Amino acid sequence: MWRTVEGIGIERKPEDCPFRRVNDIVTEIDEKDDRFMGAVAPPIYENSIYRLPDFATAKLLNKGEVDRYMYGKNANPTTDALAHKLALLEGGEAAQCYSSGTAAIFTALMASLKHGGHIVVVANVYGRTSGFLKQLFHPLGVTTTYVDGTGLQAVKDAIRSDTKVIYLESPTSWQFELQPIQAIADLARKHNITTMIDNTWATPVFQNPIGLGVDLVIHSASKYLGGHSDLVAGAIISSRERIAQLPQLGAVLSPHESAKLMKGLRTLPIRMERHEKSAMKIADYLNRNATIHEVRYPGLPDFSQYELARQQMHGCSGLLSFELDTDLAGVERFINGLRHVSIGGSWGGFDSIIYTTAMSANVEEKLLEGFIPTQCRLSVGLEHMDTLLEDLDQALRKV
């Protein structure tokens, strides 16, 4: 499945190449979409309202019996073109695009938890997701059980009669723990439980959860899908029925952001190929460095869940973490010593970005959540490999 990078990873057969698959899908959509009169780049529709021809059409539209645009807060041709692309890339029937990844997460949770109930969530999930559950859904009567999702049994043991959702994030974005997606999806289906997964790290290039049985796939499109650190967006991909049932919360993605995101999708395959290749080399370098205690990256053969990664992913993206074998002062010297890699909280763009637990406002609280004080998360960008290796090397020597 995986392409070998100087001895790291698994050899891919040409017909299994995820980069070609994604590129073919994006190109095919553009060539066959006749709504835009052959425009190579779909135009940006800046309308807030759309004219209706007559009384009868307006009435039919309000009944849901005709398919027309009326109000930009509900739908826009540019954003719909983007949603169509994302649905096909993830193997879903439909998609909805939002003004941020957190808006997409909240909408997906609200759709299934608006009447209360119980949700099973993997540990180390994205902080905003756990924040929503604690601050907004718990007061509404929703109860949450966090589990070690690396195996099926913990998830199975957490299921209750009122469980409505199992929420996955594979891999998680700091510890990079994987969940056995298909086994969990099969289990959930037997209990009539909705499954959701945050697929931001892998992207549709490297992982397709719908094909593994997951009901809803969520993306922070601000990361790899956009790829240039110049937009904030989110998306949910699922069946037509589930997408139609999502509540309208006013967080629709603007046509301008949709157009930029479509441009990002055109380069997604080639960018992910470069991210993977560079991250494999960086992870291997860090893994052999005496100042590093542990590297967490699913593409490394000594990663604890390497075999599971091979089974359910087509490859790895550019985000990894590592633990420095030093104290907090040593972490600070390392971070301040970097000349090219920037400090930042997000990831998935051209520039390499680093963040560390030690910079948190409350380090003690992070430790209780399972974080390690000397852990750093590195988003390997698209810069020349020598530039990145030289920068990391000289900064690590300051530790």
Image (tube, grey):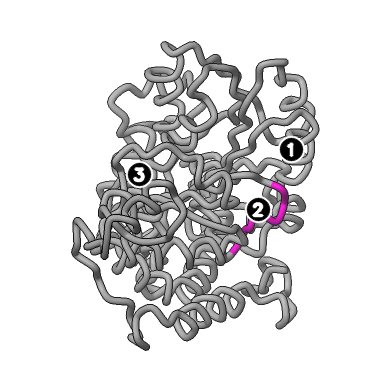
Quadrant, the N terminus:
bottom right
Question: Whole-percent x and y of residue 288?
Answer: 58, 56
Q: Quote the CA–CA distance across marks 3 and 1.
A: 31 Å
**Image height of 205 relative to 319, above or below:** below
Mark 3 is on which residue type?
Tyr
Name the residue that disc number 3 marks: 355
- Name the foreground residue: 201 vs 194: 194
Q: Quote the CA–CA distance across marks 2 and 1.
A: 12 Å
- Name the foreground residue: 110 vs 392: 110
Q: Nearer the viewer, mark 2 or mark 1?
A: 2
Mark 3 and mark 1 lie on one chain; the one further toward the N terminus is 1
The residue at 40%/25% (across/down) is 131
For label 2, the SS is helix
Question: Whole-percent x and y of residue 378?
Answer: 42, 52
Label annotation for residue 133: none
Where are the magenta residues, as a range? 206-213
For label 3, the SS is strand
268 vs 309, left or right, is left
Please identify the dominant SS of the magenta region.
Answer: helix
The residue at 46%/54% (across/down) is 65
